[in-house]
């Protein structure tokens, strides 16, 4: 159980370079593991590990599958930080947003987990942490940090996450949405007009609630479509979601105008 927790935390690091991780356990005290993690910036994300069943010593061993070398000293690297010179490694451009954040590639992300991984990474990569480092490392940290921000905001939004996943799944013209039929478009137009003509707080709150329910139900359908690998359905649902999301924005603006805080 303990090993699994440590490995789970470590996956965040390993996902960056797609290296295999193996952990070897030997006898050692809890505090020395933590000291080791703290003094070796190579395992920064293990700082907060609580080891309940001592004595254990953890050594990590990485096996390169891609033969990536440290930009600074040239040794084979297997982590965010070089094991030899401790330099922050460059962004692996082959990694997608899910991999960057150490998450499985799926529409059904747990947002709390996404936020946790994002915070963990930013706590290590934020340019503030590199104020005493070389210009090269400062630049890498700035690039990494902004990429992690972009990855987080994309995956945290149900529509943008869907669009991004479509693109990953090789959908040609991922951003290009489906042409909806006139019945649907008419329905959307009527809903927009209804919002524009509503000047009553209670009514606008009701419209907000109904529209939110539609959005949530579409998100449920989208998850199902992705799980079934039904790309055509996912594209159509995403198109609908964009329309309902724009109504949601309009309703929120109207709520603000009417001073409705519900
Ligand atoms: Zn190095």
Image (tube, grey):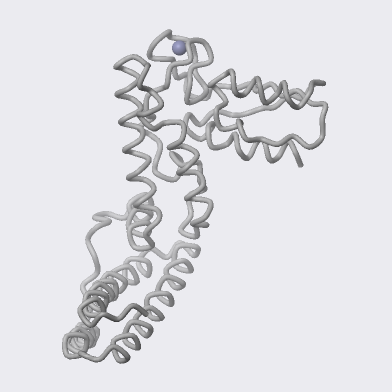
Q: Position of residue 65 (x, y in %)?
A: 52, 25
Which quarter of the picture shows residue 178?
bottom left
Q: State the count of labels.
A: 0
Q: Quadrant of the C terminus?
A: bottom left
Which quarter of the picture shows residue 11?
top right
**Residue lying at 75% horizontally and 38% vertically, measured from the top left:** 2
Q: Is residue 174 above or below residue 185?
A: above
Q: Quadrant of the N terminus?
A: top right
Q: Position of residue 248 (x, y in %)?
A: 28, 75
**Residue lying at 41% horizontally and 80% vertically, measured from the top left:** 213
**Residue lying at 41% horizontally and 26% vertically, measured from the top left:** 129
- The single residue placed furthest to the front in the displayed view is 259
Left-right relation of 137 to 116: left
Q: Is residue 25 above or below residue 7?
A: above
Left-right relation of 255 to 145: left
Q: Position of residue 128 (x, y in %)?
A: 37, 29
Q: Position of residue 6 (x, y in %)?
A: 67, 35
Q: Is residue 132 above or below residue 161?
A: above
For the residue pair 105 and 155, the one nearer the viewer reads as 155
For the residue pair 174 and 31, the one nearer the viewer reads as 31
Left-right relation of 207 to 27: left
**Residue lying at 49% horizontally and 14% vertically, measured from the top left:** 76
For the residue pair 54 and 170, the one nearer the viewer reads as 54
Q: Quadrant of ligand 1?
A: top left
């Amino acid at each position: 159980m303990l090993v699994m927790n440590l490995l789970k935390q470590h996956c965040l690091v390993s996902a960056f370079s797609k290296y295999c991780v193996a952990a070897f356990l030997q006898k050692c005290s809890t505090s020395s593991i933590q000291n080791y993690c703290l003094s070796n910036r190579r395992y920064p994300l293990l700082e907060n590990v609580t080891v309940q069943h001592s004595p254990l010593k953890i050594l990590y061993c990485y096996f390169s599958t891609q033969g990536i070398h440290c930009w600074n000293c040239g040794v084979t690297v297997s982590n965010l930080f070089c094991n030899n010179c401790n330099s922050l490694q460059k962004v692996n451009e082959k990694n997608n947003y899910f991999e960057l954040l150490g998450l499985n590639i799926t529409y059904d992300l747990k947002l709390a987990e996404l936020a946790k991984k994002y915070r963990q990474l930013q706590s290590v990569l934020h340019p503030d942490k590199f104020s005493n480092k070389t210009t090269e490392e400062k630049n890498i940290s700035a690039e990494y940090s902004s990429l992690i921000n972009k990855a987080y905001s994309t995956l945290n939004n149900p529509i943008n996450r869907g669009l991004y996943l479509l693109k990953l799944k090789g959908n040609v013209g991922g951003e290009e949405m489906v042409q909806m039929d006139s019945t649907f478009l008419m329905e959307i137009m009527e809903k927009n007009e209804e919002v524009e003509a509503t000047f009553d707080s209670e009514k606008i709150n009701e419209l907000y609630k109904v529209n939110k329910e539609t959005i949530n139900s579409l998100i449920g359908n989208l998850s199902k479509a992705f799980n079934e690998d039904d790309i055509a359905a996912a594209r159509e649902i995403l198109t609908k979601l964009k329309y309902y999301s724009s109504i949601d924005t309009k309703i929120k603006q109207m709520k603000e105008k009417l001073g409705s805080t519900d």
